[in-house]
């Protein structure tokens, strides 16, 4: 009994250290500031420039029926725009704010489904169907995917998840520029 106890107590520090190393090795970089960068200066959201840049684009295009048509753009700072184009409650330009947790979730989901490795276009000769368009700019990558016919299920689920998060936000009308 004593030998088992001594073996266990001598192995315990090694097990704890191994567990900590494995847990830390799997962590993703966390955002340090409102500019979407990590403490190491790596930009997670948007392009490499310091200015607020596009991070996420979600769009449904019109069809020959009553399809919703809108465009949502989200920038690295969390500033977002909604352009209601047809068959939506809010037509015209609107703006809002997206939380950092939502930005992180969108980028994490894009990476999880292999978004950056998808084809650029899933389409056919059919012209009366709406397209679902996603563009993600993050972690040094910029990918735009147009899905209309034959889109992978992972893309469709990602689009629907993003739409569920962003579409119902409290959008405020953007004043007209003179």
Image: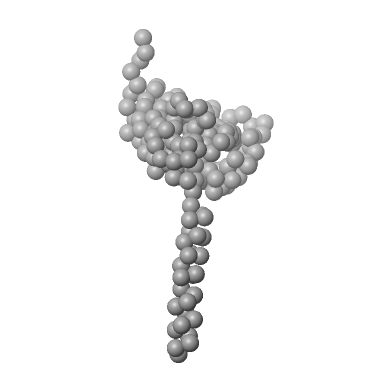
Q: Is residue 103 visible?
A: yes
Report the side of 79 relative to 155 (left or right): left
The one of 4 and 49 positioned closer to us in this rendering? 4
Q: Position of residue 33 (x, y in %)?
A: 39, 37
Q: Position of residue 117 (x, y in %)?
A: 63, 42
Residue furthest to the bottom: 1
Which residue sits at x=51%, y=55%? 26
The one of 43 and 109 positioned closer to us in this rendering? 43
Identify the image quadrant of the C terminus: top left
Residue furthest to the top: 178
Q: Is residue 71 visible?
A: no
Residue furthest to the right: 125
The one of 59 and 28 positioned closer to us in this rendering? 28
Report the side of 95 relative to 41 (left or right): left
Which residue sits at x=50%, y=38%? 42
Q: Position of residue 59 (x, y in %)?
A: 50, 31
Which residue sits at x=41%, y=40%? 32
The one of 14 and 24 positioned closer to us in this rendering? 14
In the displayed structure, 105 sits above or below 125; it is below
Q: Position of residue 91 (x, y in %)?
A: 39, 24
Report the side of 127 relative to 178 (left or right): right
Identify the image quadrant of the N terminus: bottom left
The image quadrant of residue 87 is: top left
Which residue sits at x=39%, y=30%? 79
What is the number of callouts on the image? 0
Colour logic: one colour
């Amino acid at each position: 009994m004593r030998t088992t106890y001594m073996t266990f107590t001598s192995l315990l520090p090694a097990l704890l250290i191994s567990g900590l190393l494995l847990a830390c090795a799997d962590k993703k970089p966390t955002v340090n500031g409102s500019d979407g960068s990590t403490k190491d200066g790596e930009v997670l959201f948007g392009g490499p420039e310091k200015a607020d840049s596009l991070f996420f684009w979600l769009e449904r295009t019109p069809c020959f029926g009553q399809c919703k048509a809108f465009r949502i753009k989200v920038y690295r700072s969390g500033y977002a725009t909604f352009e209601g184009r047809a068959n939506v409650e809010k037509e015209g330009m609107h703006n809002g704010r997206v939380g950092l947790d939502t930005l992180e979730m969108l980028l994490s989901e894009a990476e999880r489904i292999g978004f950056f490795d998808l084809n650029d276009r899933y389409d056919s000769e059919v012209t009366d169907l709406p397209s679902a368009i996603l563009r993600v700019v993050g972690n040094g990558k910029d990918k735009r995917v147009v899905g209309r016919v034959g889109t992978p299920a992972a893309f469709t689920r990602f689009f629907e998840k993003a739409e569920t998060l962003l579409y119902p936000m409290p959008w405020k009308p953007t004043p007209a520029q003179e």
